[in-house]
């Protein structure tokens, strides 16, 4: 038996995780659970393609730099 999306949402809420995690779409239980982050991502999706690409390039650069700093601080 496959639960409806509403039942899946309730189960995810009860287990303090996401529907995506329950479905095996992600290995991270709390990925994209933050409503503010989900709202931001939805706004990004609606941007014109050129602006979206520029924003994502900036985010990727920031993440890369943060990971590099962390790697150097571990030594």
Image (spheres, helix red, strand yellow):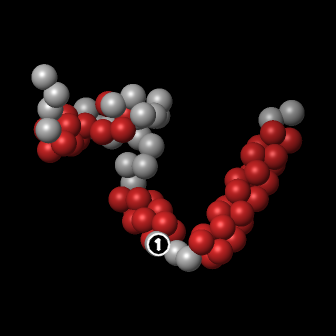
Report the front residue among 69 and 59. 59
Q: Is residue 34 above or below residue 44?
A: above
On the rendered image, what quadrant is the C terminus found in? top right
Q: Is residue 39 above or below residue 51?
A: above
**Would residue 55 be found to the left or right of residue 75 on screen?**
left
Residue 14 visible in the displayed image: no
Q: Crowding at label 1, few (<14), some or many (≥20) Cα neighbours within 10 Å?
A: few
**Would residue 18 be found to the left or right of residue 73 on screen?**
left
Residue identified by numbered label 1:
46
**Residue displayed at 66% across by 67% down:** 53
**Would residue 7 be found to the left or right of residue 54 on screen?**
left
Q: Is residue 50 above or below residue 38?
A: below
Residue 9 in the image: x percent, y percent?
Answer: 21, 42
Residue 61 in the image: x percent, y percent?
Answer: 76, 59
Residue 38 visible in the displayed image: yes
Residue 1 in the image: x percent, y percent?
Answer: 13, 22
**What count of labels does the image hold?**
1
Residue 36: quarter of image: bottom left
Residue at the top extreme of this rendering: 1
């Amino acid at each position: 038996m496959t639960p409806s999306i509403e039942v899946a949402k309730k189960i995810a809420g009860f287990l303090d995780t996401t529907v995506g995690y329950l479905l095996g779409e992600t290995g991270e239980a709390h990925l994209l659970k933050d409503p503010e982050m989900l709202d931001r991502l939805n706004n990004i999706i609606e941007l014109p393609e050129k602006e979206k690409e520029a924003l994502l390039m900036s985010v990727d650069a920031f993440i890369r730099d943060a990971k590099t700093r962390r790697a150097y601080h571990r030594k």
